[in-house]
Image (cartoon, rainbow, N blue to C red):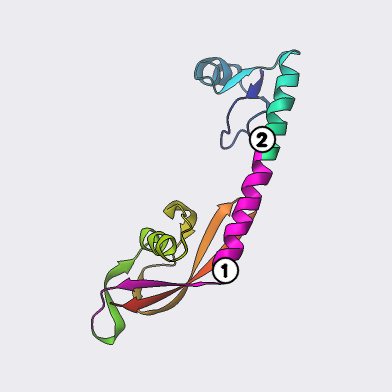
Amino acid sequence: MKVILRSDISGLGKRGDIVDVADGHGRNYLLPRGLAITASDAAQSQAAAMRRRRDLRDAADRDAAQTVASALVAKVIEVKVKAGGEGRLYGSVHAADVASAIEAQTGIEIDRKKLTVPDHIKSVGEYSVGAKLHSDVEFAVTINVVAK
């Protein structure tokens, strides 16, 4: 069964793509939930319009992510946490801590799910945190963990 996807579905395709799926999957899952429409001749032009809008939105998102990346790569974000003797932290630094520090110091809001913090930051020092804002825009943010 050929269907046109109305939203992005991981493992299947993106909005506006014409894909071939099993009859049962299309009839019982995709069509009733409004995730796809049947690929008729009349719907082909609708699929092309969906793809054009998707491409324009994707380009705008990529440009915005590139702007954020260029602003953050040049900065060192300072994360203040409680620490004991010899620079050991009480607890650890998580992605949410880094995201709130970025927002407080630069005004740029980043979802914590888009940050990749290395395994358990448990001591004072400088670390590199990965950020993936778009499928084409991936960069590293330098953070400096300091004691309060």
Residue underneath mark 2? 54
Residue 102 falls in image quadrant = bottom left
At x 55%, y 53%, the residue is 133
> How would you classify the magenta stretch by its main secondary structure?
helix
The quarter of the image holding the N terminus is: top right
The disc label shown at residue 134, or none: none
Q: Position of residue 9 (x, y in %)?
A: 56, 33
Task: Say whether residue 6 is left or right of residue 114.
Answer: right
Above or below — where is 67 with respect to 58?
A: below
Q: Position of residue 39 (x, y in %)?
A: 69, 17
- Give the magenta part as a residue range: 57-84
The amino acid beneath tag 2 is: Arg
The amino acid beneath tag 1 is: Val
At x 55%, y 17%, the residue is 31
Task: Say whether residue 95 is left or right of residue 5.
Answer: left
104 falls in the magenta region? no
Task: Say whether residue 128 is left or right of residue 51.
Answer: left
Residue underneath mark 1? 73
The quarter of the image holding the C terminus is: bottom left
Q: Position of residue 83 (x, y in %)?
A: 26, 78
Q: Nearer the viewer, residue 107 or 121?
A: 107
Give the alpha-carbon distance from disc 1 to disc 2, as whole Å. 28 Å
Q: Nearer the viewer, residue 61 or 32?
A: 61
